[in-house]
Image (cartoon, rainbow, N blue to C red):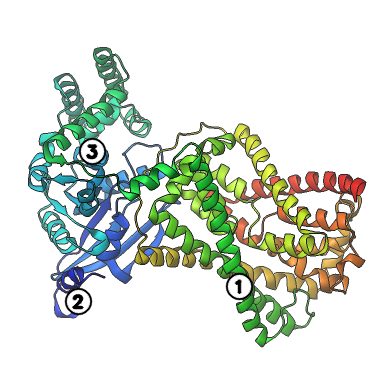
Amino acid sequence: MAAHFTKSANKMVQNSKDHVLSRNLTIALAGNANVGKSVVFNHLTGSSQIIGNWPGKTVERAQGVLNFEGRKVVVIDLPGIYSFSTFSMEEIVSREYIAFEHPDAVINVVDASVLERNLFFTIQLLEMEAPLVVCLNQVDVAKKKGISIDQKRLEQTLGVPVVSTVAIRGEGIYELTKAAVKVAESKSQSGKPCLKYGVEIEERIEKLAQAIKSENLASGYPSRWIAIKLLESDPEIRKSIDSKSEKIVRESEVLAEEISRIHEEPCFAVIASKRYSLANRIVAEVQKQSLVKTTVSEKLDWVATHSVLGYATSIGVIVGLLLWTFTVGGLLSTLFSDTLNFFGPINPTFNGSLIGILWNGVFGGLVAGITLVVPYVVPFYVMLAMIEDSGILTRVAFMMDTAMHKIGLHGKALIPLILGYGCSVPAIRACRIMETRRERLLAAFAITFAPCAARTILILGLVAAFVGVGWALALYALDIAIIFALGRIALRIVPGQSTGLIMEMHSFKVPSLSVIGKQTLARTKSLIYIVFPTYIAGSALVQVLYAVGVLMPMSDALSPLTVTWLGLPVKTGILLILGIVRKEFILLASVPVFGSTNLTLFLTPAQMITLALIGILYIPCLSTIAVLAKEFGWKTAATISAANFVTALIAGGIAVRLLSLVM
């Protein structure tokens, strides 16, 4: 950390034993995505961060504590959003927190290099009458672009404190904290002078606000803000007010229609246009732009979004990410496996004794997490955080937007889909970046078919090793084709409309090692909490089933499917049962089940390819089912699992018959 911030940190962080702290203060950080909000949060809270979910929501919540000059301050990092609409759960969470939890101060982090774009959200925060401090971040980037901002004039125009920072170096963090604490202690907000949308709109806002106030319908929100939202036809606010007063809703419709007739466009568009006009006017008053040469960042941006070069760059990033993950992951997996084998071999059907159950079940599940999840996921998370923080990932999502719309998603869905090639669990959790539940569900459904690290082990160990690399690559290609085909079907079945891509593409920058480290650690911890317990419990359950002798009868019961329809040996039923716990068990258990390492004695090439295809398509592993249930509910998890199972049966039955003709 820079020496400048170290000095500031000495002022900020103090031993609580040496101070008698008064009432705790709460400060919320709000702003668009990719403005440096997380960096500010990391500087303020250090190692005291707690990452979880908002109550009843799948949106991530980050919270931390700092001691500032004798005051204990709780810092909440709100999701990065662009407005207070109801298009996404993140937007609803943020506006409800500010309205109902009443933080003592809200720090609005804005990117100084694209001030006009960020002020659109600042104006909405002022509409909510939040006790606001504006953090004018990345002033160094703005300077490189020839942009200078009159901080004092911006402060006067907005009517709230403005503090310049370079958060990545810790510059201005102390001054920002001091300003926020001062606002928090006074709970002041005086940013109304800039919120004037024209006489014809202001008259109707005021009229509606007075009616709302007189009937006491505010419910925590400012009456003016509710009036604006009613004129914008906000569905959540309309529903809330309509349940209390149909008269107010009807009046808002009349007033909105009057505004629409005056401007000859929908009222919500008029108000949005007025906000942008306000932002434009403010920037014109406080910002000066000098001529500068084209920066390296701008040149890279041109390449990354070019109609031809952009696609080549995107494919290169995706392929590079996967190669890095599987190369480094493979090396780490081998290293961890060799180290843990010192304690004894792990065999999914070791023996039926109590010691065997405990050893291969509990310890085997732990080993699986260490050797199959951590080695692949951690390198993936490191590289993902790196390309995410650098700015290239948003360009890739932008370029792939058209292709992703074919399955009802936009470019951002590519991020969790790529993550699915490492492990389905963190990939499904990463679907939270999607705006609507429908999009999160469609993305999660597609991810359950993606060839994760465990499925890759099955493909490489069963098909590439015994049949040929070409057939292994063909399985990958077939899997991708199935994902898109099923995505098209799901798009028509799941009700709702697809949304457009709204994503901040910040300037290219050198990734921050601190940000990469903290993001990787937070994501890995959340994954471990789900995967390890499930692996351990599932592996122990399999051992119990084996010990009591029910696996073979279960395999016999599956013979109409495995033998008659899929053309596989009856013993493969055991492998598929084991594969529900962990996909790689289909390969690992084949040796003790068949009694030989030479699987060509028991399986034909066509059967090996079919078994691998079934293994990568049928019921997701227990960890994936668990995270699906947590994110979407058990009913949805069961439906997706059933869809996987049916798809695997259809694809496997067709595949074995076609392969028998050519092999």
Q: Is residue 106 visible?
A: no
Which quadrant does the N terminus fall into? bottom left
Residue ID at (32%, 52%): 78
Q: Is residue 639 left or right of residue 414?
A: right
- 386 shown above or below 295: below
Q: Residues within 10 Å of mark 3 (few under 14, many from 20)?
A: many
Density class for disc 2 (Cα within 10 Å; few <14, some 14-19, many ≥20) is some
Please report whichever mark, 2 or 1, sits nearer to the chain's N-terminal start. Answer: 2
Amino acid type of the residue tagged 1 in the rendering: Leu
| Residue type highlighted by circle 2 | Ser
In the image, residue 543 sits, relative to residue 321, either above or below, namely below
Residue denoted by label 2? 16
Secondary element type, mark 2: helix
- Of labels 1 and 3, earlier in sequence is 3
Residue at 45% across, 50% down: 393
Q: Position of residue 145 (x, y in %)?
A: 23, 46
Question: Which secondary structure lies at badge 3?
Answer: helix
* Numbered badge on residue 116: 3
Q: CA distance from mark 2 to mark 1?
A: 46 Å
In front: label 2 or label 1: 1
Nearer the viewer's eye, disc 3 or disc 2?
3
Q: Secondary structure at mark 1?
A: helix
Q: CA distance from mark 1 to mark 3?
A: 48 Å
Between 535 and 500, the one lying in front of the other is 500
The amino acid sitting under disc 3 is Glu
Residue 585 in sight: yes
Residue drawn at x 22%, y 42% as measured from the top left: 115
- Of labels 3 and 2, earlier in sequence is 2
Q: Which residue is disc 1 drawn over?
A: 331
Estimate the x, y position of residue 272 in percent, counting from the top left: 28, 29
